[in-house]
Image: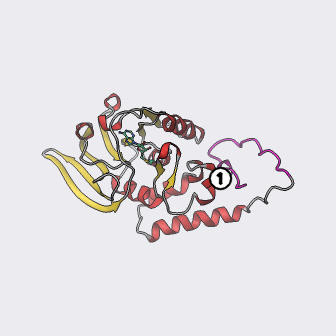
Amino acid sequence: MMPGWRDLLFGRRDAEPAAAPKPADAPPRKPARDESVGRMEFMLSLRRRGISDQAVLRAMDAVPREAFVLPQLSDEAYADQAMPIACGQTISQPYVVAYMTEQLDVKREHRVLEVGTGSGYQAAILAQLAGEVITVERYRTLADAARVRLATLGYDNVTVIAGDGLAGVPAHAPYDRIIVTAAAETVPDALVAELAEGGIMVLPLGEHGGTQRLVRLVRTKDGLARTDLIGVRFVPALPGQAREL
Ligand code: SAH
């Protein structure tokens, strides 16, 4: 058994009750040193790949990714790879999370909308940087799990909503920043309408199933200024709330 993610919360919350005693034949608990080495390599690889914004790096260091992956994959939580989560969806690769966050240029005074909560990992990173995060997920199961997870970790500035993010979330609009973490085939009009003037939206744009281009849009007085960024591969953004849970 790997140690639980609670061991790594570095005092975000009060100490959790001690884990149940292990049966005598259980494999030995890995020393904590391995975990900190894993996390150090994780941070080094983000820097090596060009993430340089100190606030983003601090946020990546602060969020315990093992709390967001499936328990049986917690050993690999700090490998730079996307991983499966429930409902056939994925938690994004840490490098892509850091890169998109850096491109979003999030400040404490911002209200940020995320479309595609998934595990809630990207939302947690945003919550380290923004004043307020609204995140929307079309699978109720994922939304409910992420809400509990984020609250347990002490994130009280995140609101998780079950619904169709492509239709926008007018209740909290306008947003200073919008991030879409599922592939859109076109720029969603409803999201452009909810982006504040001077606001930034980052989203993967392109065909479902293939690779997409990460695009950064800045809303100006005259319309949208577009910058094309790196190639990425995301699960599709689909319209409507998921019919299955
Ligand atoms: N940001 C997530 C990873 C997202 S995977 C994380 O950090 O773990 C993409 C997610 O977008 C999936 O969970 C998928 O169900 C969701 N999604 C796709 N289309 C959506 C839509 N129209 N509205 C809300 N969520 C959507």
Secondary structure beneath dot 1 equals helix
Where, quadrant-wise, is the N terminus in this rendering? bottom right
Q: Residue at x 41, y 58 (%)?
A: 96
Number of other residues with Cα within 10 Å of mark 1, as a class: few under 14, some 14 to 19, many 20 or more:
some
76 above or below 199? Answer: below
Residue 179 % position (x, y): 35, 47
Which stretch is magenta? 1-23
For ligand 1, give the image quadrant: top left
Q: Amino acid at mark 1?
A: Leu
Where residue 31 sits, quadrant-wise, is: bottom right
Q: Is residue 197 above or below residue 205?
A: above
**Which residue in the structure is indicated by mark 1?**
8
- Vertical placement of 34 versus 18: above or below? below
Residue at 30% x, 47% y: name it. Answer: 184
Indicate the position of residue 191 as horizontal and vertical percent values. Answer: 27, 39
Q: Can you name the residue that lies furthest to the left here?
A: 222
**216 part of magenta stretch:** no
